[in-house]
Every structure is written in structure tokens, then in C-alpha cells.
Amino acid sequence: MMGLLETAKISLRSLWANKMRSGLAILGVIIGVGAVIAMIAVGRGASLQIESHISSMGSNILIIVPGTTTSGGVRMGAGTQQSLSLDDAIAIEEECSAVSHVSPELSGVAQVVYGNRNWSTGVIGTTEGMMDVHNWSVSSGRFLTDQDVRSSTKVAVIGETVAYELFGSANPVGEIIRIKKVPFQVVGVLAPKGQSAFGSDQDDVIFVPVTTAQKRLFGTPFPRMVRRISVKARDAESIYLAQEQITALLRQRHRIGPNQDDDFTVRNLTQAMEAAQQSTQAMTLLLGAIASVSLLVGGIGIMNIMLVSVTERTREIGIRMAVGARPRDIRLQFLIEAFLLSVIGGIAGIALGALLSQTLVLLFDWSTSISPSSILLAFGFSGFVGVFFGFYPAYKASLMDPIEALRYE
Amino acid sequence: MALIEAEGVRKVYRMDGVTVEALKGVTFSINEGEFVAIMGPSGSGKSTLMHILGCLDVPTSGRYLLGGVDVGSLSRDGLAGIRNSKIGFVFQGFNLLQRMSALENVELPMLYGGVPSRERAEKALAALKTVGLEERKGHRPNQLSGGQQQRVAIARALVNDPPLILADEPTGNLDTKTSVEVMELLVSLNEEHGKTIVLVTHEPDIASFSKRIIRVLDGSISSDEVVIKHDGIA
Ligand SMILES: Nc1ncnc2c1ncn2[C@@H]1O[C@H](COP(=O)(O)OP(=O)(O)O)[C@@H](O)[C@H]1O
Ligand SMILES: [Mg+2]
């Protein structure tokens, strides 16, 4: 009976004695594990990014836009009709119990001037609800108030990028800027949010009272028109109820008959993001699966080398059997050899995978994330591959007839 | 007391439809402490007999008892256990592991006998001392002469202290001088350590070191006689 440790020592020695061959045998596993690690890191990086976008966008968000889309693609008119008004937003806030905050939005691109500096940016007419719906906060000054909306005051809350472009490091609060030549007083600066899920700079924005935007900045076909309404549901469970309540309310307010299509569309953004998240995860799985195939090929490489090794060492097997090695001792020796090969390949592969994903970060600015579980997975998988593909050669070795083996030249 | 009892041992090889009866039912017994030489022309069945005596193979029919145990009924594991504890092999071609030192080669049987590491090294060194090679313990087989390699192999055969040592043409690859050294070593193992030795050879000079000669011819025993007196090859 031979101990595992003894066997491992013998195995390591014979692997070391054939360095070149052992190296070639594990190359496949190194590449396989490296690919698995790197692919999972890329996939995880993407999904973490989406996750952070979801949380920066705010959770449980519904977006209402004018016009309609049908799934068959026959009518693709979302956003083309002018059917939403500020009063729709007010009615939703007051009547839909599943809704906690509402943010009507009327936006456009405008030239903004301060002194001799100017900057072109997105200007959004909105209400105080914007803060809660889209998780904004101010780093200095204040946000828009109901009072601002009621009296159409000419005040603006500016994003960090706009503040930097117009004011540099100076404090913008209290200063007067001109948006489309209309003077606005800056009352607050937004706390920065960074890039959106679609790569745009979310801090390149100016918020003004929606009523001021309607009257002073953007011409509208009818006076109280807004381009979209963002809504936050009370919680994750009430998001579908909110959707139903809003649809019913707007159909009633817009006097849409039972057989008529909606003239608005309610989009569930969280749902869309979750779908994106799911497809990223599916992608990760797919990439991982493809990479696993190379690991499998690596396993076949190990089997190949082990078969050669068993044949080459037939005489050694005969000698060991003659002095008392049982079939299972021989089997264990070769199995451990294959296992060690594979695990050493796995460790090198993990290093390669880390290097690879780091390279992707540097070259393409992708975000990657190596999780401990993917390392564990790769490690376990390579060990499994070693045992699985090592079993046949080891079994073959253990079946040898000692007399034949001793006679082998 | 009989260490080896063979009763009507037959061995039939079947290859590609051709059957060869290598042993045609041999019956003999060897007592503890004997030194027996098996002689016979090439192809007469000497090696086949040694393989069966060494538990590397089992008879096709007949019985072989080693120390009273019927070997024919044992599993592969059981045979391996007997080879490990009851039998030491010495081969014509030495059969040492090239990657290992002399000491490690001698340790090999103890590895499969579950002897703890430190005890292994001690016993292996003692066995190398018995064959006069303790200062060569770190040498690889290819750094040793043929005679030295065969002595390492003898140390390996001794190390688990088996009652029986089987040697199939142990001097076949050696010159006359080293052959005599190896034979004298076997004689001392027989006389001083009480080992039972069974040796295959076709050289009368080598056989003359033994105390009994069994002649095999065409798978059967043709003669079995005690060597009256021997003084080596003088
Ligand atoms: N594995 C085998 N398969 C088939 N025939 C064998 C095998 N081993 C030995 N033989 C045959 O058995 C006979 C005895 O062989 P062996 O015992 O090796 O003789 P010796 O050792 O006396 O030269 C020979 O005819 C040989 O060809
Ligand atoms: Mg022979």
C-alpha cells in the first residue's frame, strides 16, 4: 500500500524528468483555462457595468413617450406624435397609487453662454421629481422646486461637465448664464454620475423648470406639451401595477376608445436593462463554453501524452509490479501524474487568464472582473479534466501483464 | 519444511490459435533453506516455471503452494502482496529504474509494503551494506558496472526480508569474474541469512554453486539430483 504523498512525489519526479514533454502536454490546458478565465472576466465586467448603470439610472423606472410601437413592427411611431402634456404628468402623480415620483421632461440641445465662454449641451425642462426618479443630487446649491415650476422662474441646475466648461473651477451658483440667449440664474450644480450605459456623458446636462422650457426655450405645438414622462414605481413589485394604472389613466385622459391603439408607450427601463443583463450573462456562458472546448482539447492532449508515457514506461511498470505494486498502485500513480499535469496547467492558465484580461483592459478599455469563483471553477475543471482524461491511460497501465511488461524493450 | 510445493503444474500458452504447452505437469517441492539450480536447454520452460514460482503468473492447471498458500486462488492484488513480502527477484537484465539512485531502487519494494519513509532509508542502506555497495547509494544504475547493478538488484530482492529469492539467469549479462562474485553473494545469503534460493542457469559452472539441480526438458522434469560436493569453479 502506497501513500498519496509518496505517489505524488514519484509522479512529480517523472514529470520533471520529461520537462519538455510535460510542458507540451499542459500547453493545451494552460490555453484552455486561460481562455475560460479571460472570457468569464470579460463577461462579468460587462454585466457589472450594466448593473452599475441600472443603479445609477434609478430602479423601478417607467418611461412614457408619445406615439406607439407594435411588436410586429407595422407601426413604429413612438415619439413622433405630440400627445403628452404636463397635466398628464400631474394626473399620474396624483392618481396612480403605485407611482411614487414623476418627472415630466421637455428637452432639446441649446447653446449656453457665460461671459466669453459658450457650450452646447442638452437642456431638460423638468420638475423636482427628476431628482427622485433618476437618482440625482446636488453637490452645491439647490435643485428645482415646485415653486420654480409654478412661476416659470428662469433658474438652472447644471451638470458637472457644463460647470467645468463654463466656469472652470469657479463657483457657478448665483451666476447668470444665457440659454438660447435667455438669461438663467444658476441655482445648483449636480453631483456627477459619469457615463451612461450607452456611453454618453450624463453630467453634460442642464435642468430648468419644465414650464420655463415650454415658454422660453423650446417651441411646442401645444402649450403644456412634454416629450416624455419618467415615473418611479413605489417598489419592484408595483411596477406592473403602475404600468397598468398609467395606461388606463392616459387612455381615459386622451379619450381613446376600446378598439383604438394607445397614443403613447410605457417602457419598463429596468426590464430592458435586465434583459440586457441577461443577454450579457448568456454571452458570458457562451464564451465560457467555447473556451471550455479548448480546455477539453487540452485534456485530450494530456491523454495523448499519458498514453505515450505509459507505453514508454512499460518496463518500469513491470518492475514495479514484480516488486509488489498492485494494479491500483500503478493506476493511482498515472492518475496522479495526469492530475498534477492538469492542475499545474490550470495554475499557469489562471495566471495567463489574468494577464489576458488585464491586457484587454489596457488595450480596449474594457472592464473585466476575475471572480474567485471563476478561478475555483477553472481549477476544479482542470483537475477534473486531468482525472477524466488520465483515467484511461492509467487503467491501461494497471492492466498490464507483469511478465509482458518486464520483457518490453 | 516445504516452502515450495508444485503438484502437476501445467502451463499452456495460446497464441493466434496455436497452443504451446510450456509446462507439462511438473511436480516437485523445495524446502526452506535450499539452494536449487534449474537447468535445461533454451525453450524448455525454465522461465515459465520461474514466473509461476514468482507469482507473476498462475498455472493453467495443477497446484502451486508457497509457504502452504495455494497461489492459484489469489487475485492480482493477492499475488502482488505475495511478491512484495515473500519473494525477491533477480533478473538477467538487472531491471533497475534508471531515473533512481541505487538507494531508491532498493527502497522500491518497501514503498509498496507501506514501510514508513525513515525506516525505508535505514533498511535500504542496510541491504546495500549486505551487498557491499553502501558507498554507492547515490549512484544511478548507469553510473554502476554490471556486477554492481546486479548487486543493487540483489539488495532490492533482500530488503523486505522475503524467505524466497528467485534468480533467472542472474549472471547471463556478466563476465566470469563478476559472475563468481554475484554467485558467492547468493551463496552467503543462502548460508548466512537462510534464504531459499532458486536459480535458473544453463551454465554448469554457475549451477555448481547450488546444492541441488533440477533439469527441465521440453516442459517436464528430466532429473532432480543433489550436488554432492562443490568447491566453486576453482
Ligand atoms: N507468453 C508466451 N506466449 C506463448 N508462448 C510462450 C510464452 N512464453 C513462453 N512461451 C513458450 O513456452 C516455451 C517455454 O518458454 P520459456 O519458459 O521462456 O523457456 P526457457 O526460459 O526455458 O527458455 C517456449 O516454447 C516458448 O516459446
Ligand atoms: Mg528463459
Image: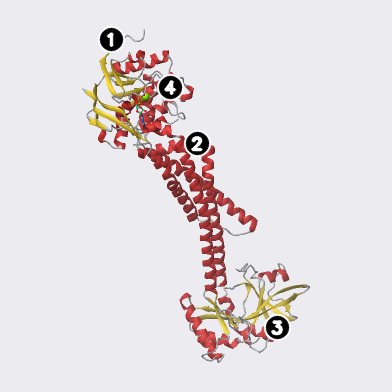
The CA span between labels 3 and 2 is: 78 Å
The answer to which of B33 and A355 lies nearer the viewer is B33
Quadrant containing the N terminus of chain A is: top left
| Residue furthest top in the image | B234
Residue annotated with mark 4? B149
Q: Callout 2, which amino acid?
A: Trp
The amino acid type, in three-letter code, at marker 4 is: Gln
The mark lying in front, picked from 2 and 1, is: 1
Q: Chain of mark 4?
A: B
Query: In 3D space, how far apart are the residues under numbered discs 3 and 4 (Cα atoms)?
Result: 102 Å
Q: Nearer the viewer, mark 4 or mark 2?
A: 4
**Precedes in sequence: disc 1 or disc 4:** 4
Q: Which residue is mark 3?
A: A217
Q: Is residue B157 left or right of residue A286?
A: left
Name the residue rendered at 54%, 45% in the picture: A27
- Report the residue marked by disc 1: B229
Q: Say whether mark 1 and mark 2 are on the same chain.
A: no
* Circle 1 crowding by C-alpha within 10 Å: few under 14, some 14–19, many from 20: few
Q: SS for tag 3? A: helix
Residue B83 lies, in percent from the top left, at 32, 30
User: Farthest residue toward the right?
Assistant: A116
- Packing grade of label 4 (10 A; few <14, some 14-19, many >=20) is many
Q: Residues within 10 Å of mark 3 (few under 14, many from 20)?
A: many
Q: CA distance from mark 4 to mark 2?
A: 24 Å
Residue A178 position, x and y percent, is 74, 78
Residue named by callout 2: A16
Viewer-side label of 3, 1 = 1
In-image side of B82 versus A129 (left or right): left
In which quadrant of the rendered view does residue B52 lie? top left
The answer to whether the residues at label 3 and label 2 have Cβ atoms under 8 Å apart is no
Q: Nearer the viewer, mark 3 or mark 4?
A: 4
